[in-house]
Amino acid sequence: MAAASDAARLLVSNRNHWVSWVLHHATSRPDGVAFRFLGVDTTWRTLWERTEKLADALHRRGVRRGDRVLLLTLNRTEFFEAVIAINAVGAIAVPVNFRLTPPEIAYLVEDSGGTIIFTEPVLAPLVAATRKATDRIETVIVMGAAGDETTLGYEELIAEDGDGRPFVELPESDPALILYTSGTTGRPKGAVLTHLNMVAQSVTCIRALGLTDEDGRALMAAPSFHVAALGSVAPALMIGHTVVIHPLKEFDPVEVVDTLERERITTVFMVPVQWQAVCAVPGIADRDFALRSLSWGAAPATDAVLEAMERTFPDAQIVAVFGQTEMSPITCVLAGADSRRKLGSIGKPIPGISARVVDVNMNDVAAGDVGEIVYRGPTLMKEYWNNPMATAAAMDGGWFHSGDLVRADDEGFLYVVDRKKDMIISGGENIYCAEVENAIAGHPTIREVAVIGRPDDRWGEVPVAVVAGDAPPTLEELREFLGDTLARYKHPAVVEYVDTLPRNASGKVVKGRLRESHGGPLPGA
């Protein structure tokens, strides 16, 4: 193991965060496997040694406590090595969505104030283009390749002769990450998550998913820059499970099913559209899985998807996890027998989280009435980076305003009705897009559906269904299908047809793009 004084190690081990967790496992179970990627195992000992050397190299290049360091990579073990090394010197890791354009990435660079960025060869041209849009990037570190005259090689940094970096004592209240929201509307905001936030998130996952087994193997299928990935890796780092990293490319449900079986995965999180594809893989019922818990979230799931999951994986616990980036992310969980009894619910707030369902005046609403869910708790972000006005608005009244509209039943189970910004007001009546989408999704020829509002001179707004599928129904056929399932005023006024719905990296439909392309006045209006 890399040389470091006993006093230096004591600074790390006296704290409770993923830097100290890696050190603990490297000491207590050095030959255990921390990460597995493309068939290559990284043991806890190797993870610590490489992390320590990389942290040393960053420190020699002036990275200090509170500095921001960006990461623009695909899924790979080095991403997590870099995050832990960045945090080990007290700096803040800023993962970046690789699907963004150079101007969009330049905005994140400028907003975060970072000057160093990690990347990899396939994304190096994107970083080069970003540097033309901002002159703030001073250092580019390329994983998996030697650096050229404008970059540094990741492995070369780790191979450098270090002079022993000064360890920093990292309080749990210090920022660990800045995660930029998906920016489906407006500019993305950087949610500052502390080490305490990630500790609380880890405990939540361990409890909700029953991660007590010593031989647990988690599949990380989400993009590493997303809170769903970081939030699922954190509990594995805490308790010493192996994380199998799934390579990022076009989602292939057959390949995922093969990986689940071959790698003996015990727990996995995926978004509903991915679960829908996985459950439809031919012959899946004949596969031999080791799965013990399945979780879904990040986007609404229709009743049809949840029923398919239950049929396909009858021996696994199906857990709905609900939340958002600003809450690290989980706030509510539905698991066990309740997942069948309360199909479609997001469950109840997790222990340690205070939640209320309120009206616009912050008054609690009655059971069955719709209101916004607001939160307090140890997973709540510290702030929005460099954005005090947005922070103040989100924390108005001393509670974090989620923007999610929900209703509670008489047992306290919560059901998502819609995003507050997506609600349609038609003729004075509230129409919740998620409710309409769920009803439409039951049509046998519709594969995907999103509902948006469209201006209307008479009603103010009317609902528009944007659908993709095999021979999807006409408007008249769809209205006949909906029948009395929905009140007539909730029925779509028009149906628009697309090949696929636009989604961001977390699997959420980007309704802003749909509004741009399908949100204009009705024909003849």
Image (cartoon, rainbow, N blue to C red):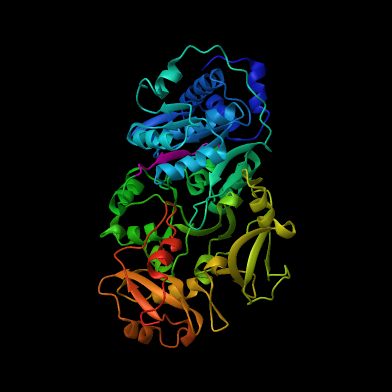
Residue 355 % position (x, y): 68, 61
Q: In the image, is residue 201 above or below residue 3? A: below
Q: In the image, is residue 290 above or below residue 24? A: below
- Magenta stretch, residue numbers: 238-248
Residue 477 % position (x, y): 32, 84
Q: How many marks?
A: 0
For residue 396, side relative to residue 475 (left or right)? right
Give the image quarter of residue 101. top left
Instruction: Inspect this view and state whether residue 230 appears.
Output: yes
For residue 408, side relative to residue 485 (left or right)? right
Q: In the image, is residue 6 above or below residue 177? A: above
- Is residue 475 magenta-colored? no
- Along the line of sight, which residue is nearer the eye, 144 or 455? 455
Which quadrant: the C terminus? Answer: bottom left
For the point 50% across and 58% down, the residue is 185
Instruction: Inspect this view and state whether residue 348 appears.
Output: no
For the point 34% across and 57% down, the residue is 278
For residue 276, side relative to residue 64 (left or right)? left
Residue 244 % position (x, y): 41, 40
- Is residue 240 magenta-colored? yes
For the point 69% across and 53% down, the residue is 392
For residue 376, side relative to residue 75 (left or right)? right
- Along the line of sight, which residue is nearer the eye, 192 or 339? 192
Give the image quarter of residue 350. bottom right
